[in-house]
Amino acid sequence: MAHAHAGTIHHAEQPSAHTGLETRKLAIWTFIGSECLFFASLISTYLVYKGKSLIGPLPHESSQCMLHGRLQECEGIFEISLVTVGTAVLLFSSFFVVMALNGAQTGNRRRLIGWLTATVLGGLFFVGMQVYEFTHFFHKGLGYTTNLFGSTFYTLTGFHGTHVTIGVIWLATVLVLAIRGKLPPEKALNLELAALYWHFVDVVWIVIFPTVYLMR
Amino acid sequence: MDLMDPRAVHKERTHPTAGLYLRVAVVLFVLTALEVYAFEVSRRGSPAGLAAIVSPLIIPILVVLSAAKFALVAMFYMHLKQDATIFSGLFVLPLIIAIVLVMALIMLFSVVHLMP
């Protein structure tokens, strides 16, 4: 049973191996560990090819690029203000999901549903921001095969965006369970696993944001 | 400490309070704002005095700020500070390998680039 004492949350009893560990939690941490290596390879590839594009558009600098079938001068492609807002929303969604978990563990259904809804909306905002950004870049002449920057940028941020999308679907599924009253405190681990994945997606963006957008 | 010992596994089983979560969120927001401010100072070159200090150090500044944000999320939101030690091991060990991988590939490709 879960016990709540004035601001202190205790874990619910979960089926465990002889080690005393919650096996599903062990599995998600192992998965997260493997994901570290996956994103490390993508970030390495981006950094190795950074500054080696022969034609624009480029992230920050003006350059010659092929647009509408002719070579012309293109400005730097990044819009830092837009991505900063997306980053802030993703960071706050991590706060929202720990508040939802707090609600799930204490049996506060209103807090659980309210904060979890905010988390899903935050995730949807981030995905929407990324779809807008990709569309905008494409119209400015940056396709997947335009240059090394385009290939490595779309691969890295696209895989991250896919992870965010999967996280939104996972959290929305847990939200539906919570609304139907199928997430009592003793099943709070179901949300904790989704929250761990969501935080991982957040920490990956904490690395990608300065590496891709702020380092010139 | 023996990680297979249930006493070690359950060293501490409490999560932080809502107030601590909020304080961490505010710190994360401030650190992000500092990152973007440092970038803008470096890009615009103004204010000139600050830009002279920030511009040569922009990469170390961004690395330190993002590492601080990463650590805050991992320790407090992912509960590594309170949870079983083995979970920290499962995260930190691949993370170290990942950092070594990134540095090794960057150095390797820098050397290849310099070769005639």
Image: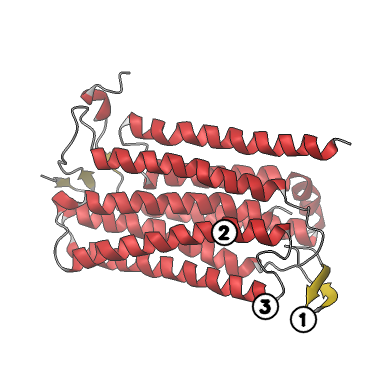
Q: Secondary structure at mark 2?
A: helix
Instruction: Residue type at mark 3: give it.
Output: His
Image disc number at residue B72 = none
Q: Determine the CA span between mark 2 and mark 1.
A: 25 Å
For the C terminus of chain B, the quadrant is top right
Percent coordinates x, y for residue B45 in the rendering = 80, 59
A187 w.r.t. A145: above or below = above
Q: Which residue is mark 1?
A: A68
Residue placed under numbered mark 3 in the picture: A139
Q: Secondary structure at mark 3?
A: helix
Chain designation of label 2:
A
**Pointer 3: residues within 10 angstroms few (<14), some, or many (20+)?**
few
From the viewer's perspective, is B116 left or right of A202? right
Q: Indicate the amino acid at tag 1.
A: His
Q: Label 1 is found on which chain of the structure?
A: A
Rendered position, A128 above or below B27: below
Circles 1 and 3, Cβ within 8 Å, touching? The answer is: no
Going from the N terminus, do you reach mark 1 or mark 3 first? Answer: 1
Question: Relative to residue A186, is residue B29 drawn left or right?
Answer: right
Q: Are marks 2 and 3 in contact (CB under 8 Å)?
A: no
Task: Name the kind of residue labelled 2 in the image.
Answer: Thr
